[in-house]
Amino acid sequence: MPPDDESDDDAPAFGAPLPPDDRLWRHPSELGPVAGVADVAAEGNERRSNSAVWGIAVVAGLLGAALSLGIVAMAGGFQSKVVDKPVVEKVPVRTVSDLASQPSGVVGVARTVAPSIVRLEVTTGTGSIVGSGVMFRDDGYLVTDAHLLQAASDVQATLADGRSVSGKVIGSDSWTAVAVVKIDAGQVPVATFGSATGLQIGQTAIAIGAPEDSGGSPSVTVGVVSALGKQVDSVEGVGLRDMIETAAAAADGSSGGALSDGNGVVIGLVTAVAEPDGANLDFAAPVDVVRSVAEDIIATGTARHTWLGVEGADADSGVRVTKVVGDSPAAQAGIASDDVIAAVDGTKVVSMSALRLTLRGHHAGDTITMVVTRSGEDLTMTATLGEKTPS
């Protein structure tokens, strides 16, 4: 027998193997025909493992690409135009199920605009009158039809949430039929004021007001924009220009309410007129004019009216002048009848309404530069705007 510290060259290196049932591992030859199945399973596991690795790699790549794009965009790597939208606030992204539960169409528009609609009860020396208003600013300023506030001695405003508060008349403008009232009710919901410059005849128009007999619910009528740039007389007999005509005939007491498009964006202020231009028609002051006048009244108590001194008609290339008032800024600039005003301060003029809106963006005393077409020749003229006040 060899010593303990010496090996036996003739003995097996690892001794005799244990019986198969006593071992954790078996040689494939000991498994017989099952070995093939085990091999396939092992191969499948390896494939699934590889697929998982590839899946993780793809997701990581996509995340990396998204992060890279974000960094490039923040660094100004992509040059694109940012278009301002007429949006009041951003909202969190909602799930598909949430969106499916939201009302759409006229119901959705009514629910969107109604919280900003106010019922006005105006007391005068001869009685009382009921109309509507639209919240313009969340600090309590609302806009309404100027005729409601003629000789007003007291104004009470009922909000959509049922509260009744006193209102203070800040100012009114008979030439545009726009007035502003201030209420103290804390922060209030406001409407989204858009623009009337892109309106198309035939598009949806929804009149929303809060008439006296509505029981607290808004009044909603639906129609279309039936005409643009209309001239009608107000209840006081003042000529109102550039009005929106709509077949959405507002209910009694809805004067001063909102005219909305199909997206719940205010495009006009419903205005009472002396004699409607047809059955079931109503009129609204364009929201661009409403906004401009309201901002003037809030800032100064009155509205400014710049004056060029021309009358005109829409033409393919601008505004064809039909009359020039004597000794007006236009006359002093050299504009004559049959001239076509094509642009003001580099902005193309597409209609008489657009020209008036452009002039409203200036103050009396401002100098404007016009491109005027005369007998096929483009001329550059300058005019210093004057100011015209209601008589």
Image (cartoon, helix red, strand yellow):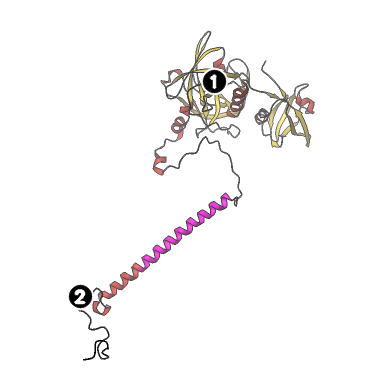
- Percent coordinates x, y for residue 252 in the rendering: 48, 19
Image quarter of residue 20: bottom left
Which element carries disc 2, helix, strand or loop?
helix
Q: Residues within 10 Å of mark 2 (few under 14, many from 20)?
A: few
- 144 lies left or right of 110: right
Label 1 and label 2: CA atoms lie apart by 95 Å
Taking 230 as reference, is 56 above or below it?
below
Amino acid residing under circle 2: Asp
Taking 61 as reference, is 210 above or below it?
above
Q: Residue at x 26, y 83 (%)?
A: 14
Residue 20 included in the magenta stretch of the image? no
Q: Which residue is mark 1?
A: 181
- 141 lies left or right of 391: left
- Percent coordinates x, y for residue 308 in the rendering: 72, 25
Residue 52 included in the magenta stretch of the image? yes
Amino acid residing under circle 1: Val
Q: Quadrant of the C terminus?
A: top right
Which element carries disc 1, helix, strand or loop?
strand
Which residues lie in the magenta part? Answer: 46-75
Q: Residue at x 57, y 53 (%)?
A: 72
Rendered image: mark on residue 22: 2
- Percent coordinates x, y for residue 241 in the rendering: 63, 24
